[in-house]
Amino acid sequence: MRTIKIIKPHQLNEEFEECKNWLEIKYNGIDQNEEWKKIGLNDIYFSLCGFGIIFYSDPKFRLNLIHELTHIIQFLQKRRFCDLESIMNGLVYMTVIYPFLRPDLISFIERKRQEEENEILRKE
Ligand SMILES: [Zn+2]
């Protein structure tokens, strides 16, 4: 079982900086962009669910950060918004940072197969 701690502001910033640094390695030269340097946690909007608590070390928090920061990079590089890129970045990040999640990942084809199987079971 995974332990969950409630996130404190300084921890939020640590996670944010780690995600930003990870993307700076992937996108050569982005760390020299003046706008990028100014991007902070307040520039990212989170939709809170439940009681509005963000949990520290919840992989979904970092996944959202990588996703949204990728869109910021697309904007700064004057490229079209592309969810394929942000989703791929999130996926690569997750499998590198949280290798224990790898066995839980399934292919799109397998997901389709499972959905169809569930649909058949539901009708029976
Ligand atoms: Zn998106």
Image (cartoon, grey):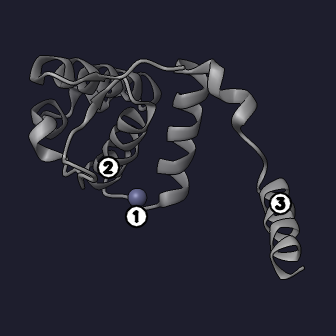
* Spot occupied by residue 28 in the image (x, y as percentages of width and height): 40, 28
| Separation of residues labelled 2 and 3 (CA atoms) | 39 Å
- Quadrant that contains the N terminus: top right
Q: Which residue is mark 2?
A: 77
Within 10 angstroms of label 1, few (less than 14), some, or many (20 or more) residues? few
**Closer to the camera in the image, 58 or 51:** 51
How many numbered discs, if any? Answer: 3
Mark 1–mark 3 CB contact (< 8 Å) = no
Disc 1 target residue: 80
The nearer-to-camera label among 2 and 3 is 3
As shown in the figure, which amino acid type bears the numbered disc 3? Gln
Distance from mark 2 CB to nearest ligand 1 atom below 8 Å: no
Which mark sits nearer the N-terminus, 1 or 3?
Answer: 1
Choose top left, top right, bottom left or bottom right for residue 122: bottom right
The image's mark for residue 114 is: 3
How far across and down, in percent of the image, does residue 71 sit? 34, 52
Q: Nearer the viewer, residue 53 or 90?
A: 53
The amino acid beneath tag 2 is Gln
Helix, strand or loop at label 1? It is loop
Dot 3 beta carbon under 8 Å from ligand 1: no
Q: 120 or 111: which is nearer to us? A: 120
Q: Residue at x 23, y 25 (%)?
A: 6
Which amino acid lies under the numbered mark 1 shown in the image of this protein?
Arg
